[in-house]
Amino acid sequence: MNPQANLIFIASLLLGTTITISSHHWVMAWTGLEINTLAILPLISKSHHPRAVEAATKYFLTQAAASALVLFSSMTNAWQTGQWDITQLTHPTSCLILTSAIAIKLGL
């Protein structure tokens, strides 16, 4: 892989992590997680081996499902409480869905 491309992907990983950690809004946290997902995919599949491409595809599908759960949890919480703030996660259904989404994103 081109060293400049590798640098861009690693910088994107750092940017996504920084956005996710410093966000107070659900959509910004989701955006940071998606930047991380899109930055790690080329790093996973850079060997051009069929198993690497298969692993990248499985990673993408799993992360996309978990991202949909994060968005669904935030929308459910906003619908129940009227708040989009991360610190206002008080509805039990939203907590359960978000916990399972984070567990999927962590690979548990």
Image (cartoon, rainbow, N blue to C red):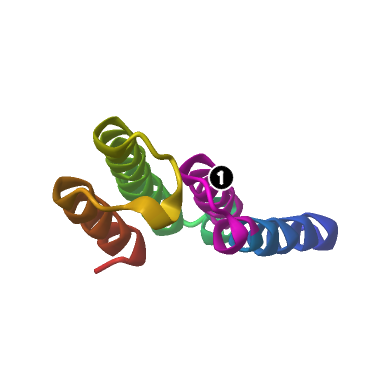
Give x and y (percent) for residue 34.
Answer: 52, 46
Give x and y (percent) for residue 62.
Answer: 31, 49
At mark 1, the secondary structure is: helix
- Residues in magenta, as a range: 19-40
| Quadrant of the image containing the C terminus | bottom left
Residue at 61%, 61% in the rendered image: 22
Residue at 48%, 57% in the rendered image: 49
* Crowd band around label 1 with a 10 angstrom C-alpha radius: few (<14), some (14–19), many (20+): some
Q: Is residue 20 magenta?
A: yes
Kindly identify which residue carries mark 1: 28
Seen from this angle, which residue lies furthest right? 4
| Quadrant of the image containing the N terminus | bottom right
Q: Is residue 101 left or right of residue 36?
A: left
Q: Is residue 35 above or below residue 15?
A: above
Seen from this angle, which residue lies furthest top? 79
Q: Is residue 107 above or below residue 76?
A: below
Decide if residue 50 is in sight here. Answer: no
Residue at 28%, 42% in the rendered image: 73
Give x and y (percent) for residue 63.
Answer: 37, 49
Along the viewing direction, whichever of 36 and 9 lies nearer the viewer = 36
Q: Is residue 82 above or below residue 91?
A: above
